[in-house]
Image (tube, rainbow, N blue to C red):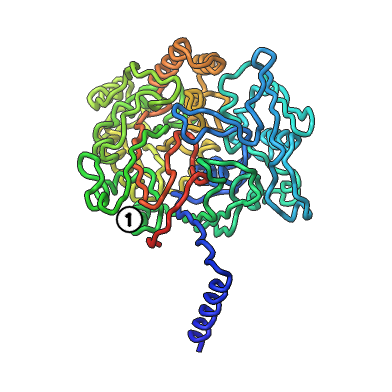
């Protein structure tokens, strides 16, 4: 009986559409995934890639990157034009667009809430709120004042010129939020994201499924003759396992796959990293992309076992770096889709010196000799002790995943080969990062994706005052801090590149990090996906995407 009723209802609906004279076009839906669960969607607080990807689409900073421009180029977003600079480059005056509105929310009591200069003052000053512990506060260390000159004019004064300051104003962290929303939801504001972006939250099943709906009140913005956003909806799944992502893409469940996992490479690529012939026949497109990303293994400089600046502690960390087999890592773990990291800076980041040569290379014999020299003697079990004879067991955190376990084995093999005993503590990455900021993690392999395409964004990761924030290694060396402070006031120049090379030398000398790799991303897209082009800095390109009619889903 129920089936008969459904059939009748469908017939009535079809008749109604026919009577109307035409069928409604099917909604344009993008099917995407995020590789890790999101956290609270608050621009001032979120720092994980999943959350930042969502924030890019829900909220609005003053500036954005031109989607197609290479090299990258900043353009106005909610600002009406690029700012006027005065006072020797220390004062930025922005004129704001007057057609920017927040998406509806009960906090506005029915008002169509316009975004103004006061909202940007409020949003940027929120970064200073000690209760939020914003990981982005360091971006505004050089700001002397933020004020609304009038309803649509914002002025920001710096203590000194900062060549990278405009990059900060294109980041999700500097997006506009409404004080009414923060006041209404308090500490839960990140669970009620209300922005001015091209999309708004539809449904949200935490760390599982998220639906974004087009914000049809989004200000008039066009891309190649189409008003943005082009899509009606984005269906997003959280897919942590690599195999599930690749199989989902191959089954047509996802419209694109960024960064084919190394362990899954053979499923889609040939030995010389070309697309498998059967995928070519299906119309799938391969686009190799050099990611502005650096993998590194950091060591806690405050840890009593591995940290410190004395010669014996430096020798221990240097030996660990000498014991890392980069060639094996790239060939076996990365399947050839990576470059060895010589400095923190990946290719195509401003300040990268292609002529720099690292003084540290894979050399287990030298690592063993160094440990012998500084009193790390081998016991009967083959493992080394501390110089005072106490046991030496390294504890490395790792992600609880298949790849995490494979990387554990690579590190175990490399460290055991130089007589170092290591145990592994698996957890979710979000939990490890929380513990890292508190200084309670000894060692962890992680990666940094550029927030903006300048070397400052990478070298700040070892700047002393950033300990407890992005400086997980808690490295605090005056010689490094002084050079970093000098370099961050300089624009791209040979003089700054020389300073960056000196910073790299200090990293190699004291070894708070073992530099690992810069990945090369093998990106795949379905034949029905339109306008797709990976951006070097922005996390997503969803607002520009279009999908042609197809039957894959």
Residue sitting at x 28%, y 31%? 326
**Front-most of 137 and 462?**
137
Residue 367 as seen in the image, left or right of residue 306: left
**Front-most of 224 and 488?**
224
Tell me the residue that label 1 is attached to. Answer: 250
Residue 123 as seen in the image, left or right of residue 53: right
Q: State whether residue 297 appears in this view.
A: no
Q: Which residue lies furthest to the bottom in this view?
A: 1
What x and y, as percent, mark residue 282? Answer: 28, 54
Q: State whether residue 187 appears in this view.
A: yes
- Disc tally is 1
Residue sitting at x 52%, y 59%? 27
Q: Which residue lies furthest to the left in this view?
A: 271
**Front-most of 48 and 15?**
15
What x and y, as percent, mark residue 324? Answer: 30, 31
Few, some or many residues within 10 Å of mark 1 (<14, 14–19, 20+): many
Task: Answer above or below: position of 12 versus 327.
Answer: below
Task: Answer above or below: position of 423 versus 235.
Answer: above
Residue sitting at x 24%, y 37%? 331
Task: Answer above or below: position of 476 versus 121.
Answer: above
């Amino acid at each position: 009986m129920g089936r008969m009723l459904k059939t009748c209802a469908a017939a009535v609906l079809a008749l109604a559409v026919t009577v109307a004279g035409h069928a409604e076009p099917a909604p344009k839906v993008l099917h995407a995934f995020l590789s890790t669960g999101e956290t609270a969607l608050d621009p001032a607080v979120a720092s994980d890639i999943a959350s930042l990807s969502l924030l890019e689409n829900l909220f609005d900073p003053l500036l954005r990157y031109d989607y197609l421009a290479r090299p990258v180029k900043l353009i106005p977003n909610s600002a009406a034009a690029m700012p006027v600079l005065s006072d020797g480059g220390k004062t930025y005056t922005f004129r704001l667009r007057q057609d920017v509105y927040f998406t509806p929310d009960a906090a506005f009591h029915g008002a169509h809430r316009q975004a103004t200069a006061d909202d940007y003052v409020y949003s940027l000053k929120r970064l200073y709120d000690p209760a939020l512990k914003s990981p982005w506060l360091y971006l505004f260390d050089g700001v002397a004042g933020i004020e609304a000159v009038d309803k649509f004019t914002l002025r920001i004064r710096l203590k000194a010129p900062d060549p990278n300051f405009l990059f900060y104003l294109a980041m999700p962290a500097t997006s506009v939020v409404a004080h009414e929303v923060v006041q209404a939801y308090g500490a839960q504001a990140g669970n009620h994201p209300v922005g001015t972006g091209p999309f708004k939250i539809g449904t949200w099943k935490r760390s599982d499924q998220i639906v974004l709906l087009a914000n049809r009140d989004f200000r008039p913005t066009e891309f190649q003759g189409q008003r943005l956003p082009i899509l009606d909806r984005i269906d997003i799944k959280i897919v942590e396992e690599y195999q599930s992502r690749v199989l989902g893409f191959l089954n047509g469940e996802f419209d694109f796959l960024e960064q084919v996992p190394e362990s899954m490479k053979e499923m889609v690529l040939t030995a010389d990293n070309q697309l498998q012939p059967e995928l070519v026949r299906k119309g799938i497109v391969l686009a190799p992309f050099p990611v502005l990303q650096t993998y590194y293994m950091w060591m806690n400089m405050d840890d009593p076992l591995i940290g410190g600046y004395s010669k014996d502690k430096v020798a221990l960390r240097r030996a660990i770096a000498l014991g890392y087999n980069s060639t094996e890592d790239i060939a076996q773990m990365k399947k050839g889709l990576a470059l060895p990291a010589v400095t923190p800076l990946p290719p195509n980041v401003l300040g990268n010196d292609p002529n720099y040569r690292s003084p540290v290379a894979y050399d287990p014999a030298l690592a063993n000799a160094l440990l012998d020299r500084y009193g790390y003697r081998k016991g009967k079990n083959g493992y080394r002790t501390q110089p005072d004879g106490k046991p030496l067991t390294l504890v490395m955190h790792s992600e609880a995943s298949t790849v995490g376990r494979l990387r554990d084995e690579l590190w175990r093999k490399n460290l055991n080969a130089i007589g170092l005993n290591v145990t592994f503590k698996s957890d979710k990455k979000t939990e490890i990062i929380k513990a890292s900021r508190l200084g309670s993690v000894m060692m962890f392999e992680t990666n940094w994706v550029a927030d903006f395409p300048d070397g400052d964004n990478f070298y700040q990761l070892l700047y002393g005052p950033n300990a407890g924030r992005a400086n997980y290694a808690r490295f605090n060396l005056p010689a490094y801090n002084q050079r970093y402070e000098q370099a961050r006031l300089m624009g791209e120049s040979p003089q700054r590149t020389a300073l960056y090379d000196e910073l790299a030398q200090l990293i190699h000398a004291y070894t708070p990090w073992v530099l690992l790799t810069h990945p090369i991303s093998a990106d795949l897209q379905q034949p029905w996906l339109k306008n797709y082009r990976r951006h070097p800095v922005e996390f997503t390109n969803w607002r520009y995407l279009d999908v042609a009619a197809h039957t894959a889903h």
